[in-house]
Image: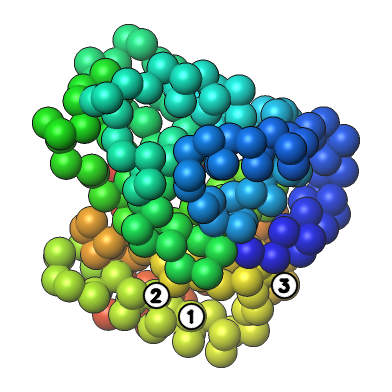
Amino acid sequence: MDWPLLIEFVRQRAPEFLAQLEGVPDASIWALTADRGAALPASYVEFLRRMGSHSGGWPPFGATLDHHFAAIVERLDQEDENAPPSDRFFPVAIETDESMVALYDCYFDLQRVEGDDAALVMLEAGVPYQWQTPIEIHETFNERVTQSLFHRFELRRCAERDEVNLGGTLRAGEGRAGLQQALVLLQRAGFEPALPPLGRVACLRAGGISVLARVNEEYELLTLLLGGDNRLSVKALADQLLAGLPGARRPSGPIEG
């Protein structure tokens, strides 16, 4: 992950946010990883360095999932012989909403590290590891952070929004195939990457319109979130995607916030 590029992207839109960030000292990070005997993805280590102590109110994993270093250390201190194996799983976000029937924390699966990134899974808190199977969320850390940043600092600032969906039939590979088709159409329309593209996530901009394209591989569903300040321009792009992508449709419910 190109952290300097992501930080510059945010700086151009919300410099006050960057002033609130507080990182974790290298010594604290290395002490924790040495104690666990775990090699963490480089992009996550840089995340901790830049904003592991305070992230300015930005919740990359969701409003009730605490990703701060102190919460991670506290969870690790509570582990016993029933905890997930430390050489495979490392917690990155802890569920804090105790009103939920079951609390699921977000973990790295360290057996699926690719470069500076790794797959994310969910494990239920308080349940012995040997009694459960990790729940796939079909995301990597880099994908989660990239789409969350783009949504927070780009799409949420747009006055007009629209959404186009494609696929969702559970046919293997349909989601990524739909993403490639959509990218071809968007590139022909002049869109360029606003942030580096990843396997299941693309963030694009052109002419005052922003697009977040992401694939949910659980349902093989492609979601295209559109944003801009000109209602007619956003609608025109949505209509162009609906016409150019066979089977594309608007959502039956509200547009995703």
Please say if the residues under marks 3 and 2 sit with CB atoms less than 8 Å apart.
no
Disc number for residue 183: 1
Please say if the residues under marks 2 and 1 sit with CB atoms less than 8 Å apart.
yes
Q: Please state which of the two labelled residues, at mark 3 or mark 2, is closer to the viewer.
A: 2
Q: CA distance from mark 2 to mark 1?
A: 6 Å
When the figure is inspected, residue 252 is found, relative to residue 53, above or below; the finding is below
Q: Read off the residue under disc 2.
A: 179
Residue at the spot x=51%, y=19% of the render? 74
The amino acid on which the numbered mark 1 sits, given as a three-letter code, is Leu
When the figure is inspected, residue 229 is found, relative to residue 25, above or below; the finding is below
When the figure is inspected, residue 95 is found, relative to residue 116, above or below; the finding is above
Q: Secondary structure at mark 1?
A: helix
Name the N-terminal-most of marks 3 and 2.
2
The location of residue 158, given as percent across then percent down, is: 66, 49
State the scheme by which the image is colored.
Answer: rainbow
Q: Secondary structure at mark 2?
A: helix
* In the displayed structure image, the side of residue 21 where residue 212 appears, left or right: left
Relative depth, front residue between 130 and 167 = 130
Answer with the quarter of the image where residue 19 lies: top right
The amino acid on which the numbered mark 3 sits, given as a three-letter code, is Gly
Residue at the spot x=60%, y=29% of the render? 68
Name the N-terminal-most of marks 3 and 1.
1
Relative depth, front residue between 41 and 105 = 41
Q: CA distance from mark 3 to mark 2?
A: 21 Å
Residue at the spot x=27%, y=61% of the render? 217
Q: Read off the residue under disc 3.
A: 207
